[in-house]
Image: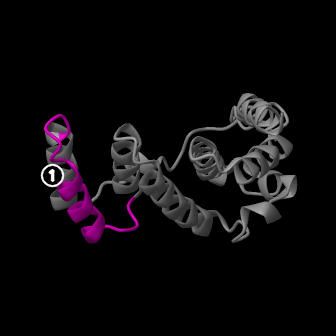
């Protein structure tokens, strides 16, 4: 299945959170430069721990603060939430192309979000020098996405080259 051949439906950011959560995310975005964004984002998370809007905002905050371990935890949480909505195996290593090809077309937007989130987990692990795990994730994504629509092939090459320089 071509991961670009779909009609975008059920986009996570189209799902509105409560007004209080939206206000906290907006307040955090206004406080980012002053370094006061984390507390409102954490408050938003406590009010809506399953909200992908909140998780994406938290992930971006931690990533741009170079707090990669925290960003990784948030990405893993988002991955679990997305996975449960598309009935994928609990362990991403068990994913097979049939999980994508057999899925109803109306889930393709969520499936792409899952795969991009898995790519984020792989990327953050790469940045944290967890190269074996990162490589496994990118190899899985390449196996699932023969046309490289998710863009994992280039990252896999980076990890392989990094591992070679460490060995040599």
Tell me: 20 left or right of 78: left
Is the residue 2 above or below the residue 89 in the image?
above
Give the residue displayed 15% in from the left and 47% down from the top.
Answer: 36
Q: Is residue 98 left or right of residue 19?
A: right
- Position above or below: 32 against 45: above
Residue 6: x, y in percent? Answer: 67, 38
Question: How far from the left and from the top, in percent, is residue 59?
Answer: 41, 49
**Within-10-Å neighbours for mark 1: few <14, some 14–19, many 20+:** some
> Which quadrant of the rendered structure holds the N terminus?
top right
Marker count (numbered)? 1
Residue 36 among magenta residues: yes
Q: Is residue 23 part of the magenta span, yes or no? A: no
For the point 82% across and 34% down, which residue is it? Answer: 164
Q: Nearer the viewer, residue 28 or 102?
A: 28
Q: Quadrant of the C terminus?
A: top right
Q: Nearer the viewer, residue 111 or 136?
A: 136
Look at mark 1 in the image and give the residue it sits on: 23
| Residue 133 visible in image | yes
* Part of the protein shown in magenta: 32-51
Q: Height in image: 81 above or below 153?
A: below
The quarter holding residue 104 reads bottom right
State the image coordinates of residue 134 (x, y, percent, origin top left).
70, 48
Query: Is residue 18 visible in this depiction of the protein?
Result: no
Residue positioned 76% across, 37% down in the render:
166
Q: Secondary structure at mark 1?
A: helix
């Amino acid at each position: 299945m071509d991961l670009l051949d779909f009609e975008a439906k059920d986009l996570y950011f189209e799902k509105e959170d409560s007004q209080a959560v939206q206000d906290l995310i907006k307040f955090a975005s206004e406080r980012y430069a002053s370094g006061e964004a984390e507390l409102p984002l954490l408050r938003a998370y406590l009010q809506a721990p399953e909200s992908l809007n909140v998780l994406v905002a938290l992930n971006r905050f931690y990533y741009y603060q170079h707090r990669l371990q925290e960003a990784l935890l948030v990405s893993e949480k988002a991955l679990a939430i997305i996975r449960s909505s598309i009935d994928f195996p609990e362990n991403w290593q068990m994913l097979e192309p049939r999980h994508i090809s057999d899925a109803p077309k109306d889930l393709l937007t969520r499936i792409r979000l899952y795969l991009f989130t898995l790519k984020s987990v792989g990327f953050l692990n790469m940045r944290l020098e967890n190269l074996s795990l990162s490589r496994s994730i990118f190899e899985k994504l390449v196996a699932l996405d023969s046309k490289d629509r998710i863009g994992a092939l280039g990252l896999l090459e980076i990890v392989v080259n990094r591992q070679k320089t460490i060995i040599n």
